[in-house]
Image: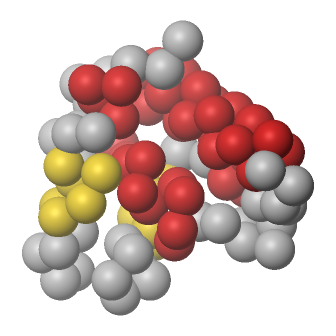
Amino acid sequence: MVDLKKATQLIKCPRCGFEFSLIYSRAFACRGCCHSVIGCKSVRCPKWDFEFELSSTSFFEEEHSSKTLSKNMSRVISDYFKEFGESPNG
């Protein structure tokens, strides 16, 4: 199950300082990426389209948590697009 509290926690882009949630990033910045539905451990800044590893932030304390949340978030986004007739890959 997705930890919504963790998924809505703000992540700060190391390049531009823009703060956003993982849910927002997955739904908008990662929408066309085929890796977004298979548990990608990276995150993309929605403002500047800069991709970086979740593990490079203080978002997770351990690598296992990063992969687990990424997989769950990917499933939620993929299910949303399936339900509303859209493809996560564009």
Q: How is the image coloured?
A: secondary structure
Q: Is residue 38 above or below residue 69?
A: below
In which quadrant will I find the C terminus?
bottom right
Q: Is residue 53 above or below residue 68?
A: below
Task: Return the residue nearer the eye: 13 or 24.
Answer: 24
Task: Return the residue nearer the eye: 59 or 28.
Answer: 28
Q: Looking at the picture, how far across and down is residue 74, in whole percent?
A: 64, 40
Q: Looking at the picture, how far across and down is residue 14, in whole percent?
A: 20, 70
Q: Is residue 1 above or below residue 33?
A: above
Q: Looking at the picture, how far across and down is residue 54, in whole percent?
A: 37, 48
Q: From where the camera sits, is residue 13 visible?
A: yes
In which quadrant will I find the N terminus?
top right
Q: Residue at x 75, y 37 (%)?
A: 79
Task: Return the residue nearer the eye: 25 or 44.
Answer: 25
Q: Is residue 11 left or right of residue 84?
A: left
Q: From where the camera sits, is residue 63 visible?
A: no
Q: Looking at the picture, how far across and down is residue 82, in whole percent?
A: 84, 45
Q: Residue at x 25, y 60 (%)?
A: 20
Task: Return the residue nearer the eye: 2 or 39.
Answer: 2
Given the current orientation, which residue lies at the most extreme top position? 1
Q: Residue at x 85, y 61 (%)?
A: 87
Q: Residue at x 33, y 83 (%)?
A: 47
Quarter location, residue 86: bottom right
Q: Is residue 80 left or right of residue 23?
A: right
Given the current orientation, which residue lies at the most extreme left position? 17
Given the current orientation, which residue lies at the most extreme bottom position? 48
Tell how many labels.
0
